[in-house]
Amino acid sequence: MTAPLAYLDHAATTPLRPEALEAMLPYLTDRFGNPSGSHAVSRVARRAVDEARDTVAECLGCEPGEVVFTSGGTESDNLALAGVQRHRGGTVVCAATEHHAVLHAVTALGGRVVAVGGDGVIDLDALAAAVGDDTAVVSVMLANNEVGTVQPLAEVAALVRRLAPGAVVHTDAVQAFAWLDVATLAAPAELVAVSAHKFGGPKGVGALVVRSGVVLDPLFHGGGQERERRSGTHNVAGIVGMAAAMRATVEGREATVARVGALRDRLADGLLAAVPGAVETGPRAGRVAGSCHLRFPGVESEALLVLLDDAGVCASAGSACASGAMEPSHVLAAMGVPRPEARSSLRLSLGPTTTDDEVDLALKVVPEAVGRLREG
Ligand code: PLP
């Protein structure tokens, strides 16, 4: 594979941070122990997992004992929703723009889905009408994976405390962690999901914060790791890599948000100016810094993505899982974007490694590609 000239799909996944790779390598080679064992080789691995747990807890604003290591965002979301519901019964509730890891779990668990406004922000009146004494979990993501909308989690949690005091709040912070101070913003939630590969860690590892006092039934039965909450031999290298990526993300976050936010603004403003009829999705102020979501009426996003790919620009039409399927995004539908327009959308997601040159290339290639497609 020749390297893309512009990788603008950081919401799908991010390149591994050098700090993460370096931290992981010993645990992929000579420090191979199983942390659940009792001998010297195991102890080396256990110490690494314990240290990673301390780092992850610090970065997420919780106690080390409240961190449950998982295989990623999908498992963390499912564990939060199904785990609590299995333990105590009741209904699960989520916003209509949640990632499928939450939305499909809520549907499978017979739960309720709450509307959002045209700006992608959850409708608090609709949420108030959907929760009550039978509610077990309310799940509202911190930042959206397609359009980057940041949700008012503190208001959501306050509403839940008032109207459904027996319920717990879960937040999918998978897309938020790279950009937002999750330790503070997710503090009102009892359950918080993150995934390493969205912030420069390896794929296939994540965490769920389960605040003390919240009890959930495990999804897997087995060796009883993670204090009986998640059985399965620890992914030691992955956990160590996630912790290193978390630390680096938190340390650089403020500067990254400022730098990448300015790049995103240049990209969005440039494309809006260069492409007639281009529309930006949702108010930019309420979105995370790396998110640029535009619609080009009259252009099919699948065709646009092919031309961009040919020109070395990696982008996406919606969430990575949805592209390839021609169904327009459920997020845009929930925001009231008409179907044909939703099918003309382009998600350009930036990250800490994004350069001026990548943005320059996109500013040249996207208008040319849209122009070609419109000419037919
Ligand atoms: N939640 C959100 C908001 C996501 O963007 C994603 C991945 O795209 C997930 C959950 C799933 O995470 P993972 O890929 O680690 O299973």
Image (cartoon, helix red, strand yellow):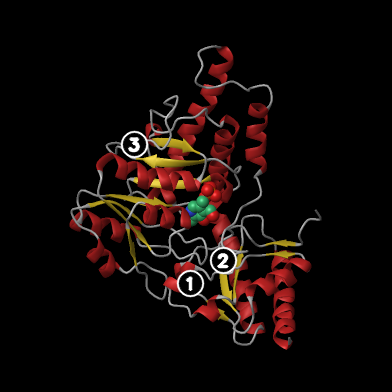
Question: In terms of secondary structure, where does tag 1 sit?
Answer: helix
Q: Amino acid at mark 3?
A: Asp
Task: Please identify the quarter of the rendering in which residue 62 is found.
Answer: top left
Q: Residue furthest right?
A: 2
| Label 1 or label 2, whichever comes before in sequence order | 2
Q: Residues within 10 Å of mark 3 (few under 14, many from 20)?
A: some
**Residue at disc 3, secondary structure:** loop
Per the image, label 2 sits on a secondary structure element best described as loop
- From the viewer's side, name the closer residue of 221 and 262: 221
Task: Report how far apart the C-alphas of labels 1 and 3 lie in the structure.
Answer: 34 Å
Residue type at mark 2 is: Gly
Please name the residue that numbered disc 1 is placed on.
Answer: 332
Find disc 3 in the rendering and name its residue.
217
Query: Relative to 77, is 296 on the left or the right?
Result: right
- Residue type at tag 1: Leu
Where, by quadrant of the figure, is residue 280 drawn? bottom right
Say above or below: 350 vs 109: below
Q: Is residue 64 above or below residue 259?
A: above
Q: Residues within 10 Å of mark 1 (few under 14, many from 20)?
A: many
Residue under numbered circle 2: 318
| Residue at (67, 83) in percent of width and height | 274
Within 8 Å of ligand 1, the CB of disc 3? no
Q: Is residue 5 left or right of residue 9?
A: right
